[in-house]
Amino acid sequence: MKQLAMAMSPVSILADDFEDALRKSHLRAIEFSQGKVTSEEAVELELTKAAANKARSLHEAGLLQVPSIHLPFCPENPWSVTSLDEAERASSVQMIRRYLECMEGLDFHYITIHCGIECTSNDPAFRKSLRQQMKRTCLDLLPFLEKIQASLNLELLPRLCIGNHEDELLEIASDLPTQYINLNLDINHFMNRAAEVPNVIRKCASRIRAFHLSDYDSVDECHWQFGHGVLDWSAILDAINELPDNVLLIDETSALLPPAYRKISGNNTPTPLAVRFHSAEADFVRFLCAHEWDALVAKVFPN
């Protein structure tokens, strides 16, 4: 059985209703997911430390598992892991180490990372130079990854981001130790390649350690609940079932009510965390029973 988790931000972890929602949920594992940050790292790190302390307390109490940490991402220093400016890139490596040191005691074994910026250019030579910088960042982090015994998982990203195709990720990871440098496939980032997801999973099988799971429209990322888009969940389940059980499945869906609807309705409060936990549980049941779901749909709506 694969381990199941859901993405959770520091703000959500610090929310008053987080512990109560966690206690009532069947799902007790999260990816600590910082999300996009500004370059004002001090403010972000204070938030990070407070959320990490709360998560650590819940982990020590046996209520919470944190198998994965999603590093912050930002196109500017201090998170510019593919910067052609070596001083900026070196600074980003140190920031990553400082960030992960805040997570001590959470017993995570995976780390998700974005391979740098969303490019303004699709020039092959320019993209290659950024991939080479990402490989240098991985090499610089290797001693730290060995020390904490964690795998750095390069995430498949959308649009013109570095790592927007599995071949780019495999190129970066090539010749790097499989114990410490691997992949996280976000199946919501495949753009117009939705039908290719199962084959890409098989292609990258030896390096996949985690997935970000959500549905989308085969145009651009949507982070919809499972089954609300175009993905073939039965075929994806079959491909994932061929992988080892140490693969982590992370529900990375957006809030149930889109911001525009909340604004129209006059309800600007966040989705209650109990609802988010329940939604993630429903997503995983829908996914892990995908074949049964297809059979039921065929029975209820016969041709």
Image: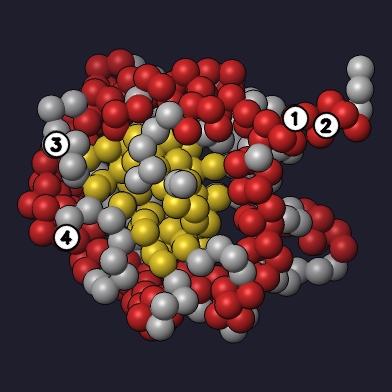
Query: Is residue 241 depicted above or below 212 in this figure?
Result: above
Residue at disc 3, secondary structure: loop
Residue 134 drawn above or below residue 150: above
Q: Of marks 4 and 1, which one's residue comes earlier in the chain?
A: 4
| Among numbered discs 2 and 4, the one appearing first in the sequence | 4
Report if residue 33 is visible in the image.
no
Q: Which mark is residue 297?
A: 2
Residue annotated with mark 3: 177
Q: Quadrant of the C terminus?
A: top right
Q: Earlier in the sequence, mark 1 or mark 3?
A: 3
Q: Which mark is first along the chain, 3 or 2?
A: 3
Mark 4 vs mark 1, foreground winner is 1
Three-letter residue code for mark 3:
Pro
Please report the residue visible at 35 percent of the width from the left and 25 percent of the height from the top. 204
Element under disc 2: helix
Q: Which residue is mark 1?
A: 294
